[in-house]
Image: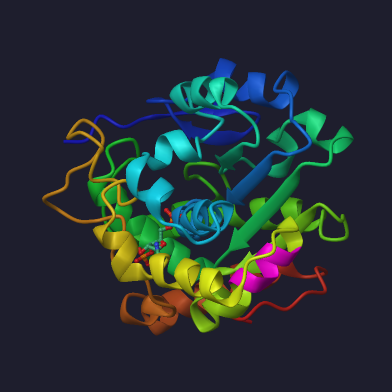
């Protein structure tokens, strides 16, 4: 049986293991963002680790040595976790930092800085399905039981890091800032090379064609799945049940069609429309 449990901070659920009220508040109010920080921001299960790999590869001009030799949790620490925060505070600049936090809990000092944010978002139905499978193996998260049960929790936002709708609506408000860039998991899938080029442009990094090829090759699903520094296999049994599944599970778009019934999908669509109306944006899944 899983011992996972959540606490609530400012109306949002967080896993009690690895996160605390103090670590989250510190990040919001005291964390000093540096001008050369690059933040990898995503709602959980939207491609956070994929983007971390891409950014790690871009940093070293496509050379995979860094992402193959240093743990993801050291390279791109999650600032809201107790351990990740300590790593981040000790990391020499320029830092690559990850977070699943909603925008209202993001470091306030970001607004006075030139730090860059890359926000990755994904079809929420695929996020739901990915969450469902991950929660069966990741011991910080509650096992939701059936997908039907998780569907309701997901749509009401009673899941780790809160509502997908709030997350996306909050972050997308930053879309006109020069130091904010957003991209979808679907775009990464459809055109990884073009996406890497756009990310490099945003970061002001000039990679030649071969270096871009190397980023694309080493960020592939199979290469990442085999990279023990990025695939979560370094996590002990306390955190993850490796016998039951993997972080890199399927890595495709539209897997929700294999999981949701027509009625569940239509219900999802109704809640989606209610929540997203007035956003005036279209995403690849709309
Ligand atoms: P699936 O469960 O649908 O396979 P996160 O990193 O935010 O937890 O997201 C995990 C999802 O990203 C998983 O989706 C995982 O397979 C997918 N993913 C991770 N690395 C990937 C890669 N290199 N290419 C495609 N998908 C990847």
Q: In which quarter of the image is the N terminus?
A: top left
| Residue under the image location 66 percent in, 64 percent down | 199
Q: Residue furthest left?
A: 243
- Is residue 165 at least partly visible in the picture? no
Foreground pick, 222 / 246: 222
Vertical position of residue 46 compared to residue 139: above or below: below
Please say whether residue 159 is visible from this viewpoint: yes
Q: Position of residue 36 (x, y in %)?
A: 74, 39
Magenta stretch encompasses residue 200: yes
Residue at the (31%, 65%) spot, across then down? 223
Q: Pick the residue in front: 159 or 216.
A: 216
Region rendered in magenta: 196-201
Q: Which quadrant does ligand 1 occupy?
A: bottom left
Seen from the viewer's position, the closer of residues 194 and 107 is 194
Vertical order, 172 against 27 (above or below): below
* Badge count: 0
Location of the C terminus (image quadrant): bottom right
Display coloring: rainbow
Left or right relative to 60: residue 240? left
Relative side of 1 to 266, left or right: left
Residue 144 picture location, percent across and down:
31, 49
Q: Residue at x 37, y 77 (%)?
A: 255
Tell me the chief SS of the magenta region. Answer: helix
The x, y position of residue 79, in whole percent, is 56, 31
In this rendering, position of residue 204 left or right of residue 266 = right
Residue 6 in picture, x, y percent from top left: 43, 30
Left or right of 207 on screen, residue 138: left
């Amino acid at each position: 049986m899983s011992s996972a449990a959540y606490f609530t901070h400012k109306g949002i659920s967080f896993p009690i293991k690895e996160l605390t009220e103090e670590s989250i508040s510190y990040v919001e109010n005291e964390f000093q963002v540096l001008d050369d920080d690059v933040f990898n921001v995503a709602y959980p299960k939207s491609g956070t680790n994929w983007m971390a790999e891409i950014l790690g590869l871009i940093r070293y001009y496509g050379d995979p040595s860094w992402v193959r030799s240093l743990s993801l949790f050291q390279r791109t620490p999650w600032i809201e976790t107790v351990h990740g925060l300590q790593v981040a505070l000790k990391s020499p600049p320029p830092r690559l930092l990850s977070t699943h936090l909603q925008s209202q809990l993001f470091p306030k000092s970001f607004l006075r800085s030139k730090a860059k944010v890359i926000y990755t978002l994904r079809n929420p139905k695929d996020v739901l399905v990915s969450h469902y499978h991950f929660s069966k193996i990741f011991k910080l998260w509650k096992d939701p039981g059936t997908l039907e049960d998780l569907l309701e929790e997901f749509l009401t936002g009673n899941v780790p890091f809160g509502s997908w709708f709030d997350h996306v609506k909050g972050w997308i408000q930053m879309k006109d800032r020069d130091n904010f860039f957003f991209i979808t998991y679907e775009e990464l899938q459809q055109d990884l090379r073009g996406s890497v080029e756009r990310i490099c442009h945003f970061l002001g990094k000039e990679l030649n064609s071969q270096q871009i090829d190397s980023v694309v090759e080493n960020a592939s699903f199979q290469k990442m799945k085999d990279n023990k520094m990025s695939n979560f296999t370094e996590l002990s049994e306390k955190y993850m049940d490796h016998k039951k599944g993997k972080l890199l599970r399927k890595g495709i778009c539209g897997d929700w069609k294999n999981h949701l019934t027509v009625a569940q999908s239509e219900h999802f669509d109704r809640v989606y429309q209610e929540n997203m109306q007035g956003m005036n944006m279209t995403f690849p899944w709309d």
